[in-house]
Amino acid sequence: MTCAVLSIGTELTRGELVNTNASWLSAALTDLGFEVIEQAVVDDEKERIVATVERLSRLVPVIVCTGGLGPTTDDLTTVAVASALGVGLERDEASLELIRRRLEKFGRTMSDSNAKQADFPAGAAILANPIGTAPGFGVTLNGTRAFFMPGVPREMKRMYEEQVVPRIRDLAQKVSHQIHFRTFGLPESVVGERLAGVEEAFPGVTIGYRAHFPEIEVKVLARAALGADKKSTEDAARDLAERAAAEVKTRLADVIYGDGDDTFAGVVGRALRTRGLTLAIAESCTGGLVGHMLTKEPGASDYLLLDAVTYANSAKQTVLGVDEEVLRGHGAVSPEVACRMAEGARRVAGSDVALSITGVAGPTGGTDAKPVGLVYLAVATAKGTVVKERRFPGERFNIQTLAAYVGLAMVRDAANEGR
C-alpha cells in the first residue's frame, strides 16, 4: 500500500531546519511494508496546508504528518485539517487535564495558547503524547487515513510507534525486508551498471542507492504480499532479500566493506583488533583526519598507538626521523618520504603496522611535476613497506577524504594479509 509523509513548518520550507522527521518516518513506514511515494513540505499557512492535505488524501490511502501542533499562533495544522474536513473544533477535557499536569510538573501554569492544544477536529481520534504537551490526532479524509503528530522528533517517534503503527500495521498489505551494503571505491554510476538486471532476476526486489561521499550505500529491499500467516510472509520477504543480496555481494565483492551500520574506520579497526595488531599513523596533507576517523569508533585504544601530524618538514625529521637529504632530494611529496614516514612512525611507536600520507591537498602548492591531488601513501610492516601513488580529483576536502579512505583501505588489507 502506498502512503505519503507530510511535514508542516515554515522553518522547513526556509531551510532553517533539516527535515529529519521525514527521513525517519519514510524509513519506518518502508520497514512496515508501505511504499512511500511522496514526501511533501508546506509552510505554516492555513490555506496551503488545507490544499496539501486535500491533494494527498486523493493520492494515497495513508498520510503521516508532523508539525504545527504547538501553542503558538503559527501552529495551524489542527485548524487547517478541521477546515479540510468541513467540521469545527472540539475541546477534549482529558487531553486538557494531561497538558495541565505536565505544565505543573515543570512549574508552569496553563495559558490559553497551551489550552488550544486540547482542541481537535470534531470526530478525530486522539493520539496520546506521553512525553510532551501536544497530543496528536487521526482523521479520515476522502477515505484516506491521516495521522498528525508534533514535530519534536523524540515525541514524534514515540507516538508513531505507540499510536500510529497499531492503527496502520494491517493496512500495509505487504511485508518488507531490507539489507544494506556499504561500498567504497566505485562511483554510483558504475555500481549501478554492475547491478543491472538484479531487480529483473528477483521480482519483488528493489535496489536503491545513496551516495554520501566517498561511499555508496546499496539497499536491497524485498517485498512480499501479506498472506494469512504473517510469519510465513516475513520469512518469504527475508529469503527473497537474502537471495538478491547474495547476488549483489558477488557483483560488488571488491568494493563492499560492510553492511548495516558499519563504518569504514570501524571495519578497519575490527580487522586490527581481531588479529591483535597495533597501528601508528604519520599524517601530513590529511592533517589528522585518519586518526579522527579511527578514534570516533569506541575501542580505538585497543590498536591505535600513535597519530602524528607531521605537517612541516622539520616535524618529519624530528618526530619520524626522516633524513634531511631525502626531503631535500625528493621533496616532502614523494614515495621516498612516504616510506620513511611510515617506517619512522612504526619505529617510534613500536607498532605492527604504520600508515603514512603525504600529498598536495590544494588549492595552492601544486606544480606541473606535483599537481594538486597528488598523494603518496605507504604502509610499513615487519614484511616491508608498500607505497602507492594516487591522483585525487576535486577540492581540498575531497582530496583529504579520499586520501584518508585509501590509507585506511591499505591498513585493512595489510591486517587481513597478516602483515
Image: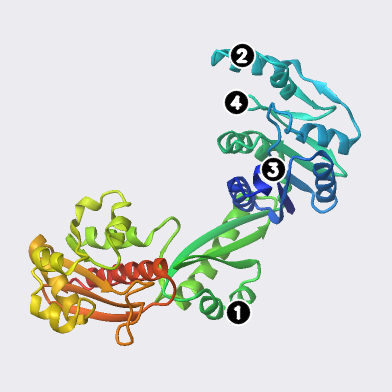
Q: Which residue is mark 1?
A: 197
Q: Quadrant of residue 134?
A: top right
Q: Secondary structure at mark 1?
A: loop
Disc 1 or 4, which lies upstream in sequence? Answer: 4
Q: Quadrant of residue 372?
A: bottom left
Mark 1 belongs to which amino acid?
A: Gly
Q: Which residue is mark 2?
A: 101
Give the mark toward the camera: 2 or 1. 2
Mark 3 belongs to which amino acid?
A: Thr
Give the mark toward the camera: 2 or 4. 2
Question: Do tag 3 and tag 1 residues touch (Cβ < 8 Å)?
Answer: no
Q: Residue furthest right?
A: 86
Disc 2 or 3, which lies upstream in sequence? Answer: 3
Disc 3 or 1, which lies upstream in sequence? Answer: 3
**Going 65% across and 53% down the picture, which residue do you hit?**
33
Mark 4 Cα shell of 10 Å, populated few (<14), some (14-19), many (≥20): some
Question: Do tag 2 and tag 1 residues touch (Cβ < 8 Å)?
Answer: no
Where residue 346 appears, as percent x and y from the top left, is 12, 66
Mark 4 belongs to which amino acid?
A: Pro
Give the mark toward the camera: 2 or 3. 3
Q: CA distance from mark 2 to mark 4?
A: 12 Å
Q: Residue furthest bottom?
A: 369
Disc 4 or 3, which lies upstream in sequence? Answer: 3
Give the mark toward the camera: 1 or 4. 4
Disc 2 or 4, which lies upstream in sequence? Answer: 2
Where residue 196 appears, as percent x and y from the top left, is 58, 79
Q: CA distance from mark 2 to mark 1?
A: 58 Å
Question: Do tag 2 and tag 3 residues touch (Cβ < 8 Å)?
Answer: no
Q: Quadrant of the N terminus?
A: bottom right
Residue 130 circle label: 4
Q: CA distance from mark 2 to mark 3?
A: 30 Å
Mark 2 belongs to which amino acid?
A: Arg
